[in-house]
Image (tube, rainbow, N blue to C red):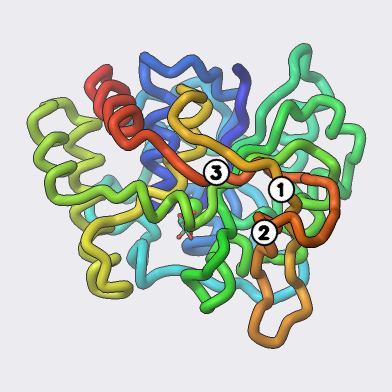
Amino acid sequence: MNVILDCDPGHDDAIAIILAASKISPLHIEAITTVAGNVGVEKNTLNTLKICDIVGLKEVPVAQGSTRPMVKESEIAEEIHGESGLDGPNLPAVPQKEKIDQHAVDLIIEKLIGAKEPITLVPTGPLTNIAMALVKEPNIKANIQEIVLMGGGTFGNWTPAAEFNIYVDAEAAKVVFESGVPIRMFGLDITHQVLATNETITDLQQIKNPVAEFVAELLEFFIQAYKDHFDFDGGPIHDACTVAHLMDPSIFTFEHVHVDIETKGEFTYGMTSVDLGGVTGKAPNVYVATDLNQDKFWSLFKEAISAY
Ligand code: BDR
Ligand code: CA
């Protein structure tokens, strides 16, 4: 399966890339594109390149994307991911790998227009690049297999109503959710069930390879940030759910429902209105993840990282 990872690394974005690039992964990464989100797009790009160095993704093109949301000002999540966007591990200041000299939106369009087989888009940050690509070249829709994204939920983590990725660029999310392209959504209802704990770190330390060590260091920071900021006992590795599902579609279960994006509410901007009760009578446009098999998820996680 061919995928484009569109991301803002980000501790959990990093884990998503690491799973996708593992030897046991059936995914072929066509490109990795970056977007303003957890921190500014330049930092997110540097982090992506450093992750590629660590996992040996030499050939995969990395393209930098949108510097800010479509309509409103940027908003970042430094309190969760640190000043660099990937605080914790001691990484070299300058990555070996270089980004390509093409904008992410243009690379996404080029890849999709030239695709011999449909490509699955995997956005794990704000949806700015994906919306921009759909607006700039609507013909790409024919070659998108599905958009498998992390975002939204029936409650928020940035406001009481809104999850960070959707809140940062709700206008972009509206374009994407109304595009008619098949969407699979991993919102907070599911990702808060996928909690990395100190036990996860101990398991990783036993694997004894540099990637496992890197993930353990990422999680040490991330778990502490979730403790300090949300008083959580564990760090939800939100973005990793998207890739885990693509690697093993039997882990998660879904409901096919209608989802609207709120862009006007005084208190609800960026909310995903998830019609689980079927009260709108509108046609379903999103497969929303509602449940998972914990054993299968964590076995896949460990197997993928052990394979490095
Ligand atoms: C989402 O926001 C980011 O901080 C994470 O990387 C994830 O994509 C969770 O709300
Ligand atoms: Ca992210």
Residue drawn at point x = 76 percent, y = 73 percent: 263
| Amino acid type, residue under disc 2 in the picture | Val
Q: CA distance from mark 2 to mark 1?
A: 7 Å
* Residue at figure coordinates x 91%, y 33% from the top left: 139
Does residue 101 show up? Answer: no
Q: Residues within 10 Å of mark 2 (few under 14, many from 20)?
A: some
The residue pinned by badge 2 equals: 274
Q: Where does residue 161 sit, x and y in percent of width and height?
A: 58, 74
Q: Amino acid at mark 1?
A: Val
Checking the image for residue 143, the label placed there is none
Determine whether 33 is above or below 280 in the image.
above
**How dense is the environment of label 1, judged by Cα within 10 Å: few (below 14), some, or many (20 and up)?**
some
- Residue on which the image places disc 3: 289
State the CA–CA distance, disc 1 to disc 3.
Answer: 10 Å
Q: Amino acid at mark 3?
A: Ala
- Which is nearer the N-term, disc 1 or disc 3? 1
| Quarter of the view holding residue 264 | bottom right
* Rendered image: mark on residue 257: 1
Residue that appears at 87% across and 49% down:
135
Q: Is residue 220 left or right of residue 294?
A: left
Q: Position of residue 65 (x, y in %)?
A: 65, 49
Give the distance between the C-alpha atoms of the residues marked 2 and 3, in whole angstroms. Answer: 11 Å
Name the residue: 30% across, 50% down: 195
Of callouts 2 and 1, the N-terminal one: 1
CB atoms at circles 2 and 3 under 8 Å apart? no
Tag 1 near tag 3, CB within 8 Å: no
